[in-house]
Amino acid sequence: DLSEMIGNVLITGGTGLLALNWALAICDKINVTLGVHNRSLKFSNFKHINMNLESVNDLAKLFEKIDADAVIHTAGMTNVEQCEKMKTLAHFVNVTLAENVAKACSMTKLSFIHISTDHLFSGENSYINENEKPNPLNIYGKTKAEAENRVIEANPKSLIIRTNFFGWGTSYRKSFSDI
C-alpha cells in the first residue's frame, strides 16, 4: 500500500491524463500536489504548484520547500505523431526534463518514480521482461528509452515504470476511452 510508505507526493505533468487520474485515485489516502505548467486546475482534492522543469537547481530548491516524500514524473510529450514532427522538442521534454527531475530528486534525497512506456519495444515479442534490450520503432519510444538511461545515471535509486495508460480525459485533451 503506497499510503503506508508515502504521505505526501508531488506529481509532475499535473494537467496530463495520467497525473490527474492517478491523483484522483490516491488523494483520499495521500496528500497530492500536482506540478503544473501553463495551465491551472480547479480541484479541491489536492494542491497544485507551478513548476518549471528546466533548471535542476530551481527544482531542488522547490523540492526542499515542499513537504513531499516522493516525486512521480509523468510529464512528457506523449503524442506519437507530434514527436515524429518535432523531434528536438520531444527529446527536450522526454529526455532532458526527466533527467533534470531525477537529478533534483537525487540532490534533495527524494524518492523518484519515472513513468516510461511500453513503446520501448517493437511489438514482435509477446512477453518482455525488464532485462530485454529496448527496440523502439518511433521517436517517442526512442526518447523514452534514452530518458530511462539518463534517469538511472542521474539517480540510480529511481524506480522506472514501463506502462501504457488509458482513462478519462479532460476538456482540453480527450483520451482514447473518451472517443
Image: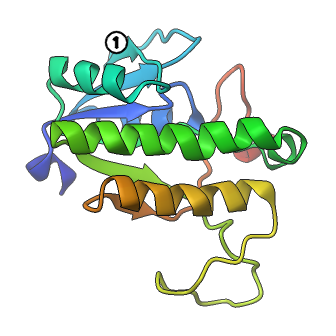
Q: Residue furthest left?
A: 4
Which quadrant of the view contains residue 33?
A: top left
User: Is residue 1 placed above or below 36 in the rendered structure?
Assistant: below
Q: Is residue 152 in sight in this rendering?
A: yes
User: Is residue 13 placed above or below 161 in the rendered structure?
Assistant: above
Figure quadrant of the C terminus? top right
Q: Is residue 29 in sight in this rendering?
A: no
Residue found at x 52% / y 37%: 97
Mark 1 Cα-neighbour bin, 10 Å: few <14, some 14–19, many ≥20: few
Which of 144 and 72 lies nearest the eye of the viewer? 144
| Percent x, y of residue 44 | 34, 12
Tag 1 secondary structure: loop
User: Is residue 61 placed above or below 109 in the rendered structure?
Assistant: above
Instruction: Name the side, left or right, on which 59 lies relative to 115.
Output: left
**Residue under numbered circle 1:** 44
| Percent x, y of residue 170 | 64, 25
Which of 5 and 155 lies nearest the eye of the viewer? 155
Instruction: Name the side, left or right, on which 114 lies relative to 125.
Output: left
Which amino acid lies under the numbered mark 1 shown in the image of this protein? Ser
| Percent x, y of residue 28 | 23, 33
Residue found at x 51% / y 65%: 162
Which quadrant of the view contains residue 65?
A: top left
Total marks drawn? 1
Residue found at x 71% / y 46%: 177
Figure quadrant of the N terminus? bottom left
Residue found at x 61% / y 44%: 94
| Percent x, y of residue 132 | 55, 87
Instruction: Name the side, left or right, on which 157 lies relative to 175.
Output: left
Which of 17 and 77 lies nearest the eye of the viewer? 77
Which quadrant of the view contains residue 104?
A: top left
